């Protein structure tokens, strides 16, 4: 193994400053779960502390109400329980790709091939990050106890919108601020819901069924349930559903960026097209890393990609998980 290669036709596209921005261009649009997590929260090492609150203000054994007091007098002091302090380690996953020397030196055609390498690498990393986040949320979310539907959504007698409303009720707990705003289902569940609904554009004509609105190809707003349903391509099994309160996020993403193999812990800018115009998009740092070197024997350029981050659930009652749809 030798150090980073320099000075050939397409090698500038393989340097960290260019490569990491290209990687974000492919990864960031495919991260489904990030809208429902606090962060990213940058850390300065591979381990970190976080606060976990399972009870919230309503379930606190020390909960007290504000007593009356005389204006001008000292305010009475209330006592309350502190959230638990937990520790975790960053999760690191990655891989490498061998780029033939001919691709590196082949000018325009080589650039097109390198673009495909970045596309594939970005998609794989996004899959891995999403799957890890979903696994953590499913394991640590509050479990639904009474919302499991009588019929799976593929059944002719299924009532998906009623099921979503029953699921949302599980998050409505007296004294807690959580209200389910969004649900996530896998590909099969998404299309079963889509087949059931009527749509604002006139699709389907069953007047007895609720109306949905396609926000984009992967998102449906269900007006009767007042809930947005998202399609998740990887990490969720058929029949499972996750419910979240987007306004009270119950999970955090912590990241670590090794300055030797990343662009540091700051935000990342990459070029993209918005409303038909090229612009620079500013996104958080998700702990993506990159390194490249030339193999002495084959002269292939080895591109190494990995991430260092970890999702933790901090408020389990702000997230619900169930199966059976």
Image: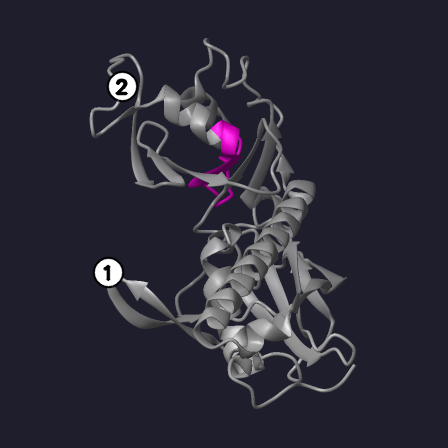
Point out which mark residue 204 bears.
2
Is 82 magenta? The answer is no
Locate the N terminus by quadrant: bottom right
- x, y percent for residue 161: 40, 23
Task: Specify the segment rendered in magenta.
Answer: 169-189
Residue 215's place in the image compared with 4, above or below, is: above
- Give whichever of 15, 160 is nearer the camera: 15
Residue drawn at x 22%, y 29% as measured from the top left: 200
Residue 311 falls in which quadrant of the image? bottom right
Secondary structure of the residue carrying tag 1 is: loop
Secondary structure at numbered mark 2: loop
Q: Position of residue 88 (x, y in %)?
A: 75, 62
Q: Position of residue 174 (x, y in %)?
A: 50, 36
Q: Give whichever of 300, 211 is nearer the camera.
A: 300
Q: Which mark is residue 275?
A: 1
Quarter in which the C terminus is drawn:
top right
Q: Which mark is residue 10?
A: none
Residues packed near mark 1 inside 10 Å, few (<14), some (14 to 19) or many (20 plus): few
Report crowding for label 2: few under 14, some 14 to 19, many 20 or more residues within 10 A (C-alpha): some
> If you read the primary sequence from the N terminus, does the residue marked by circle 2 or circle 1 appear first?
2
Q: Is residue 39 visible?
A: no
| Residue occupying the far top of the picture | 157
Foreground residue among 248 and 101: 101
């Amino acid at each position: 193994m030798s150090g980073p290669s320099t000075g050939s036709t397409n090698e500038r596209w393989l340097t960290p400053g260019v490569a990491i921005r290209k990687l974000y261009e492919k990864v960031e649009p495919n991260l489904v779960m990030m809208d429902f997590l606090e962060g990213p929260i940058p850390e300065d090492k591979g381990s970190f502390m976080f606060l976990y609150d399972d009870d919230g203000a309503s379930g606190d054994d020390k909960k007290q109400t504000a007593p009356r007091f005389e204006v001008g007098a000292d305010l009475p002091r209330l006592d309350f329980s502190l959230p638990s302090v937990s520790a975790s380690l960053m999760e690191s996953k990655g891989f490498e790709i061998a780029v033939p020397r001919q691709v590196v030196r082949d000018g325009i055609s080589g650039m097109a091939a390198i673009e495909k390498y970045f596309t594939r690498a970005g998609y794989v990393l996004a899959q891995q990050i999403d799957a890890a986040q979903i696994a953590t949320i499913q394991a640590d979310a509050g479990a639904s106890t009474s919302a499991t539907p009588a019929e799976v959504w593929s059944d002719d007698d299924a009532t998906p919108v009623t099921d979503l409303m029953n699921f949302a009720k599980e998050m409505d707990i007296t004294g807690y601020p959580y209200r389910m705003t969004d649900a996530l289902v896998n590909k099969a569940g998404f299309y079963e819901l889509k087949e059931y609904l009527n749509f604002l554009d006139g699709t389907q004509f069953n007047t007895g069924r609720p109306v949905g609105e396609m926000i984009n190809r992967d998102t449906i707003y269900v007006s009767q349930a007042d809930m947005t349903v998202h399609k998740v391509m990887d990490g969720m099994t058929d029949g499972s559903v996750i419910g979240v309160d987007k306004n009270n996020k119950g999970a955090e993403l912590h990241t670590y960026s090794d300055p030797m193999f990343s662009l540091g812990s700051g935000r990342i800018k990459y070029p993209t097209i918005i409303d038909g115009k090229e612009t620079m998009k500013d996104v958080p740092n998700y702990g993506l890393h990159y390194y490249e070197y030339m193999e002495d024997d084959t002269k292939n350029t080895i591109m190494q990609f990995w991430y260092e981050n970890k999702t933790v659930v901090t408020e389990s009652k702000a997230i619900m998980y169930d199966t059976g749809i």
